[in-house]
Image: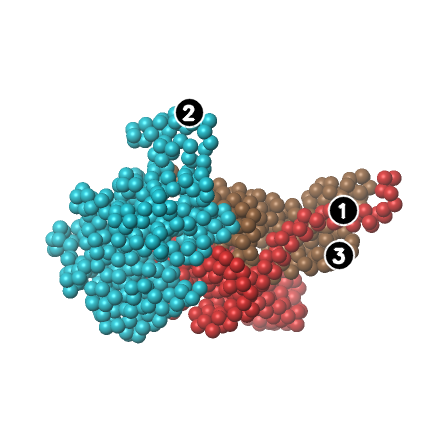
Chain colours: A brown, B cyan, C red
């Protein structure tokens, strides 16, 4: 009896140590984010102190950011672009994945392999030709120019195809007998069955577009069309490293995704696992 | 303000009455910089009021990408009618067939030769001007009066020579108990304007010359260049009065009151005057660059406006009109007041009110003896100075060796550009 | 059914399939395949945006391989990989392994580790850039100063700068890897552990003989995705070094910065395209290599 108690005690001591270490690690992970937010509420003469709670908290940096700079416009741009691209990816990738999974026709394999092979091509290789293409088509400095490279993705096609494998053909056949056409079947029967995959794909796509830097930097010319990351980079140059302003910009750039995460945590983590493992 | 409203009203009424006339639209491009944008916008409003049948579309691009955007757009036939370019890009633009010469009728060569500061003649090829500046820039020494007082120095007496500069910098450097510098006596940051100070000012003051007259040959790899570079890098390595890129950007350190002496361009004035909600609490003065061995030197750069090959017919006429307007004396004075850049016409600059101005004055007086580097790749050639300094400061390489490497790299950039 | 004029069900469905695929196929050809081809063909020209594309054979590649800076850049690129992979793998596995054993506050802790993954790299690069400054402004050096420890040069050092730039990249990716590891660990059947315990295996033995071998697929997945990420590092370097040059003295300059500068600052499109072909080749080889390793083991 006594021995078991000691054993249990040893376990709980060990657990406490592990827990403490993990908690310290978690705090360390959050430190940059905490300091970022903290600095954004400080006056410029206080930001180089190590205290986290400002002695004299202020919203003046935020007010300045939204009233005197184009930051709000960038926020809107990022939002529009990420949203449109995400919907396009969801629709087309699901449609392609569904077609390649549920239809038997000549050339199916070639199409699938061809789309899959695009996963091997790094964006960096495509940006120069994309730039030339946009230039020739007058897409530089336009929403469409920002969006067109991401409207469909090989990754999403692959992910959706994997998931449609799990949808029984009987369901679809039943719908055919009910007289639905193939497009209706896709929208009304098939799509609702792969909601978890769609949400995973939505998370990845939105996040990827929200944080994208290289292509938006190349294709935008006027400040009115910048996305958040491009704006932030140029903004940091213009403000001559006024750190409290840069931190405020960084905070505003990170806030939307952090808020969404707080609201939909479980959902997002499940999505990441689904997307990560199947994709 | 009232004047603006008046102008706006005139403009509106004029444009109303002129509605029957055909409106000619021209595109004007420059890079994005808050003060420059508002200055050009004001000029456009005034211009359009005078010329109701011309509409100027003003487009700006981020500085870092400006050059690319212009090159790409022009090559796609989509460029502007009037474009602003850095003086050092002229060769590239001519080679690319982007610019057309300014017509002798509207812009007689002799007149420009006479009325503008001499460095503008770099824009003349085979007797024809291709572009004209509204404003020019030069360098000057900023100092923080409060820090001078704290160090027991006379806040109204900035250093006049390099020796004084070094002496002051030593007194103005502050360290913490561990010996880390927490306030630099003098900023050192070749990613800013220092590289120009070293190249065109220090090398000449030590008796050398940075490049051959045609700009095709690097000459600073000699004893004079070495002495100049030793002084420059010595601020950090020997005298320890500075930290390279202190506080990430040296102008940030100066603005934050953590740097006592700082060399920068006249465009910095515009940002100092940025008022509003976040006023700058800084007691500063600005003076001419310190001399050495009795030699004064300065570096001037400028942006010019050229008419592209795309503009033809009525558009070309409108573009010429606009170019004339933005290089008028009136426009130059406005540019000086708004942007803090110096008038390119001698007559405007050398007015006593400008020449003796408490802030612009130092820059304008510097124009008298300023030279412009013939850059082949501004970013690339600047990087050679950045690396030259870093090799000495970070890896402990000897100044002589590092200078030789820089000269080789610089020459390679020039050769490559010339062999294109 | 009557208006189908002899089309079989199979043919009818094939028509639907192609109908669904026609827009995507056009899209993939224009936006993926043609540009890939264009990048390859551009790499054999001296094109500089203005002017003609003249074919110059392998000249760009020859110039590239004779350029000592390019080799430094390649070296840096692999350094990011060689530091990045082991550090992030070790950290994320250790955290996931222990996090898995914790019930109290599991969700909260997991969330804390995951949050950096959701931040914008550009934004956080500036935060880290600030942290790395010397006194009197840099948080790290201020903290070191409080502890009475010598100051570090971080971004102003030719040796410390690369790891310093790499840190935020590792930091941001860690949460994703932990989540994937946790899922992997959870998917190992309990019966394996029970059998091991009956055999009297200790924690360490279980870790080495059951957990890790069972996670082989997970590890391969993480290694491939993060390798590609580290080899393509850009946002952090561009925003944490002076003028985005990848300095000091090219100490942090990776391939993608080099490509960007060649293409969009020097306008040497042909040269830049040649560099993208090199990047493409490296990524391809590494992916195939790792897939092969996985297949062999699987």
Which label is found at residue A129?
A: none
Instruction: Report which residue position mark 3 lands on.
Output: A107
Q: Looking at the image, can residue C112 be seen? A: no
Q: Give neighbour class at mark 1: few <14, some 14-19, many 20+ (Cα, 10 Å).
A: some
Element carrying mark 2: helix
Vertically, is B141 above or below A3?
A: above
Q: Chain of mark 1?
A: C
Dot 3 and dot 1 residues touching (CB under 8 Å): no
Vertically, is C157 above or below B150?
A: below
Instruction: Report which residue position mark 2 lands on.
Output: B17
Residue that appears at 20% across and 67% down: B206
Residue that appears at 71% across and 56% down: A111
Image quadrant in which you'd find residue C97: bottom right
Q: Nearer the viewer, residue A8 or B257?
A: B257
Q: Give neighbour class at mark 2: few <14, some 14-19, many 20+ (Cα, 10 Å).
A: few
What distance separates the C-alpha of mark 2 from that of mark 3? 66 Å
Q: Nearer the viewer, residue C176 or B280?
A: B280
Same chain check for tags 3 and 1: no
Q: Chain of mark 2?
A: B
Judged by depth in the image, the label closer to the viewer, 2 or 3, is: 2
For the N terminus of chain C, the image quarter is top right
For the C terminus of chain C, the image quarter is bottom right
Element carrying mark 3: loop
Element carrying mark 1: helix
Same chain check for tags 2 and 3: no
Which label is found at residue C16?
A: 1
What distance separates the C-alpha of mark 3 from that of mark 1? 14 Å
Q: Give neighbour class at mark 3: few <14, some 14-19, many 20+ (Cα, 10 Å).
A: few
């Amino acid at each position: 009896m006594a021995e078991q108690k000691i054993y249990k005690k040893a376990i709980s001591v060990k657990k406490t140590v592990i827990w403490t270490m993990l908690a310290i690690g978690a705090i360390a992970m959050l430190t940059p984010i905490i300091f970022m937010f903290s600095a954004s509420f400080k006056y410029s003469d206080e930001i180089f102190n190590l205290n986290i709670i400002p002695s004299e908290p202020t919203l003046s940096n935020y007010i300045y950011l939204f009233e005197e700079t184009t930051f709000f416009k960038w926020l809107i741009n990022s939002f529009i672009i990420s949203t449109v691209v995400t919907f396009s990816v969801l629709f087309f990738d699901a449609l392609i994945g569904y077609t390649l999974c549920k239809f038997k026709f000549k050339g199916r394999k070639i199409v699938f392999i061809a789309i899959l092979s695009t996963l091997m091509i790094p964006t960096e290789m495509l940006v120069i030709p994309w730039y030339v293409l946009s230039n020739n088509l007058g897409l530089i400095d336009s929403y469409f120019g920002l969006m067109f490279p991401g409207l469909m993705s090989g990754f999403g096609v692959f992910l959706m195809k994997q998931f449609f494998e799990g949808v029984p053909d009987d369901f679809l056949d039943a719908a055919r007998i009910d007289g639905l056409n193939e497009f209706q079947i896709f929208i009304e029967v098939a799509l609702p069955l792969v909601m978890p995959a769609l949400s995973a794909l939505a998370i990845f796509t939105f996040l990827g577009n929200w944080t994208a830097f290289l292509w938006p930097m190349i294709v935008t010319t006027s400040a009115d069309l910048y996305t958040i990351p491009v704006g932030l980079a140029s903004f940091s140059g213009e403000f001559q490293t006024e750190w409290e302003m840069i931190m405020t910009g960084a905070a505003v750039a990170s806030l939307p995704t952090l808020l969404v995460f707080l609201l939909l945590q479980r959902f997002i983590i499940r999505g990441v696992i689904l997307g990560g493992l199947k994709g | 303000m009232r004047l603006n409203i008046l102008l706006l009203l005139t403009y509106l009424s004029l444009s109303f009455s002129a509605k029957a006339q055909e409106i000619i639209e021209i595109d004007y491009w420059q890079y994005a910089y808050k003060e420059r944008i508002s200055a050009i916008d004001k000029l456009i409003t005034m211009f359009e009021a005078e010329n109701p049948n011309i509409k100027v579309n003003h487009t700006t691009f981020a500085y870092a990408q400006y050059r690319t955007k212009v090159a790409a757009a022009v090559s796609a036939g989509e460029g502007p009618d009037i474009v602003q370019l850095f003086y050092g890009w002229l060769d590239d633009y001519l080679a690319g067939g982007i610019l057309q010469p300014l017509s002798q009728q509207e812009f007689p060569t002799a007149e420009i030769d006479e009325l503008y500061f001499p460095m503008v003649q770099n824009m003349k090829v085979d007797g024809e001007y291709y572009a004209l500046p509204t404003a020019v820039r030069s360098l000057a020494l900023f100092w923080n009066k409060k820090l001078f007082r704290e160090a027991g120095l006379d806040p109204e007496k900035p250093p006049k020579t390099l020796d004084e500069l070094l002496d002051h910098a030593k007194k103005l450097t502050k360290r913490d108990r561990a010996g880390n510098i927490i306030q630099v006596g003098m900023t050192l940051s070749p990613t800013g304007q220092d590289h120009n100070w070293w190249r065109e000012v220090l090398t000449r003051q030590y008796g050398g010359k940075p490049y051959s007259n045609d700009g095709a040959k690097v000459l600073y790899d000699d004893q004079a260049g070495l002495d100049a570079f030793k002084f420059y890098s010595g601020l950090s390595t020997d005298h320890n009065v500075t930290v390279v890129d202190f506080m990430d950007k040296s102008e940030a350190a100066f603005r934050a009151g953590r740097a006592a002496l700082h060399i920068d361009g006249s465009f910095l004035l515009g940002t100092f005057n940025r008022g509003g909600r976040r006023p700058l609490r800084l007691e500063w003065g600005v003076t001419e660059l310190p001399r050495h061995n009795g030699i004064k030197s300065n570096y001037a750069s400028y942006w010019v406006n050229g008419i592209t090959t795309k503009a033809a017919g009525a558009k070309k006429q409108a573009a010429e009109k606009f170019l004339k307007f933005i290089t008028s004396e009136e426009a130059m004075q406005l540019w000086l007041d708004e942007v803090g850049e110096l008038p390119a016409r001698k007559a405007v600059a050398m007015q006593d009110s400008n020449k003796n101005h408490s802030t612009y004055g130092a820059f304008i007086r510097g124009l008298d003896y300023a030279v412009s580097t013939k850059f082949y790749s501004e970013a690339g050639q600047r990087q050679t100075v950045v690396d030259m300094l870093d090799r000495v400061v970070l890896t402990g390489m000897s100044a002589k060796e590092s200078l030789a490497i820089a000269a080789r790299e610089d020459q390679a950039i020039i050769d490559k550009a010339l062999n294109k | 059914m009557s208006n189908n004029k002899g089309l079989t069900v199979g043919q009818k469905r094939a028509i639907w399939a192609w109908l669904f695929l026609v827009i995507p196929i056009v899209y993939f050809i224009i936006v993926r395949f043609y540009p890939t081809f264009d990048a390859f063909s551009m790499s054999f020209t001296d094109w500089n945006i203005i002017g003609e594309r003249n074919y110059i054979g392998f000249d760009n590649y020859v110039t590239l391989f004779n350029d000592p800076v390019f080799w430094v850049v390649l070296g840096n690129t692999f350094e990011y990989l060689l530091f990045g992979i082991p550090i992030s793998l070790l950290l994320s596995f250790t955290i996931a392994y222990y996090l898995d054993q914790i019930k109290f506050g599991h969700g909260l802790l997991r969330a804390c580790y995951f949050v950096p993954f959701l931040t914008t790299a550009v934004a956080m690069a500036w935060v880290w850039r600030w942290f790395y400054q010397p006194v009197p402004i840099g948080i790290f050096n201020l903290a070191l100063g409080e502890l009475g420890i010598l100051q570090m040069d971080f971004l102003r050092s030719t040796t410390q700068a690369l790891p310093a730039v790499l840190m935020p990249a590792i930091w941001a990716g860690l949460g994703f890897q932990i989540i994937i590891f946790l899922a992997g660990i959870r998917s190992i059947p309990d019966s394996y552990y029970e059998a091991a315990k009956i055999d009297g295996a200790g924690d360490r033995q279980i870790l080495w003989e059951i957990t890790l071998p069972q996670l082989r697929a997970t590890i391969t997945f993480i290694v491939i995705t993060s390798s590609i990420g580290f080899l393509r590092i850009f946002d952090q370097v561009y925003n944490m070094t002076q003028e985005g040059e990848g300095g000091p003295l090219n100490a942090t300059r990776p391939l993608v910065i080099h490509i960007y500068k060649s293409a969009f600052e020097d306008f040497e499109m042909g040269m830049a395209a040649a560099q993208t072909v090199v990047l493409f080749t490296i990524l391809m080889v590494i992916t195939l290599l790792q897939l092969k390793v996985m297949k062999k083991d699987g």
